[in-house]
Amino acid sequence: MKMIASAIIFLNFLMVATALRFADQQDCTALSSCPHKEKLQPSGTVLEILPEKCLKIICVNGSATPRLYHGEKTCGCCEFRGALYPPGKVFLAGCVKMACEDGRWKPSGEIEKRCKQCEVFNDPHFFSYDRHRFDYHGDCKYALTQKGTSVTPDYGVFAQFQRCYGLPSCIHTTTFKDNPKLVIELAQSGLAPPNIFKILVNGQDYVVPEGSYAYRITDGGKPQDVLAWRQGDCLRMLGSQGLFIQVCKHRIDLWSHPYLGTNLCGLCGSPDNLASNDFTARNNQEYTLQFMAPEDFASSWKTVDQASPACTGGGRPGTGGGRPGTSSTTEAEKRLRTCQKDRRSWRNLSVQCDEAVNSIEVNGQKAGKELNGSLVEACAFDLCMITKGSQNPKEEIKTWLGEVQKMTKERVFIQTMVAVCDPEAGECVDLPPSTTEPPTSTTACASFDCEIDIIFNPFT
């Protein structure tokens, strides 16, 4: 602590001298601010954070003032979004259980039950945040979830779909925008490991390290408030706005903090406990729920940065309308009906899928009833697309059933790791009380113009 005190005294000496220079150039009000990194910082600004000492240095009326957290004898804290956490376990950002060990975050794999999950899997099939199961086979880049309805949202998760097996579309690449200044591109080098762990951070190469700890993403050497880690063959990422994602070879899972509620919009809907408004377009027009998502709803969530000219024009973002040729949903639906008419063949496909899904057990559990039904149904659809669109369907079906088993293992693992935080153990500091429900609305995205405060930071 003596070294810290000496450093603060020296820092204050430099700051006073610099402040006087600013005062000569401007006015005496500069003396209440703190010069830091070539700028005057107002009183109350956090100048430095020293997690290893559980200490922050704050500007207080022109003076760099140390402030200890969790007691004078506590060391080895962990930091996230400016908050200092003592050694121990906590559901960080409300959703992801982490252990703070020697100043580093170690994920357990557990996810808090109150965090709403959206699933996008295979080619692609969806579960919205409010658990409406639907399909949409677009060929463009779409907002899976984002803040509000703007075509330039502050944060969100976006996915590029492209054709596979000649007709339906599959997940290709994913964009995780944590804030207006931080954009992370995933799967640019491929979705299979180890390429899935190679990402682009504001256009710069970054490899998520191996190991059992979560690592802060860096941009130009500067740490960002995004944690990333490897979960088996998948990549997990926790952002600063309340979004947590897992990207695997054939699926994307998203979770949202309970406070986000109607601030989120997109193909995943709003996590507002109202499945009836899940098909809400960018212009706030609601469509009736159905198994195949309406083209006008889905196309309205196309992004502005489209790679294909076919994805622009009549289906431009911000409108309710789509453009013919940007989705294979109708063709896929016709192909599916053809498969289902041949009842014997359809039953054979379903049996193969049922055997593949039910062969998987994780942590002593198999897929629950709802999950089992959706995985088998999606698998049978996929096999139908292969039989009608592949030149070597027998071999490709065999290969795909192996992929289905891997996907089932990833999804059942999630099922087994749903947990409830323990308030007495201090695990729930980033969550609202268990009796508090997220706000509901009859119109999705109704509050997208509201600003979200620092919703996870219990200390400021």
Image (cartoon, helix red, strand yellow):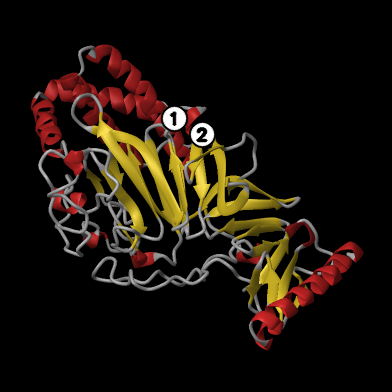
- Marks 1 and 2: in contact by CB < 8 Å? yes
- Neighbour class for label 1 at 10 Å: few (<14), some, many (≥20)? some
Quadrant of image for the C terminus: bottom right
Q: Nearer the viewer, residue 243 or 372?
A: 243
Residue found at the very far bottom of the displayed protein = 28
Quadrant of image for the N terminus: bottom right
As drawn, is 347 to the left or to the right of 441? left
As drawn, is 270 to the left or to the right of 16? left
Q: Which mark is residue 189?
A: 1
* Residue 15 image point, x, y percent: 76, 73
**Residue behind mark 2:** 198
Q: Residue at x 29, y 55 (%)?
A: 266
Residue found at the very far right of the displayed protein = 2
317 is higher (above) or lower (below) than 187? below
As drawn, is 289 to the left or to the right of 7? left
* Residue 151 image point, x, y percent: 29, 58
142 is higher (above) or lower (below) than 440? above
* Residue 120 image point, x, y percent: 33, 42
* Residue 424 image point, x, y percent: 65, 66
Q: Residue at x 35, y 57 (%)?
A: 146
- Neighbour class for label 2 at 10 Å: few (<14), some, many (≥20)? many
Query: Which image quadrant is residue 116 in?
Result: bottom left
Residue 417 visible here: no
Determine the CA span between mark 2 and mark 1: 7 Å
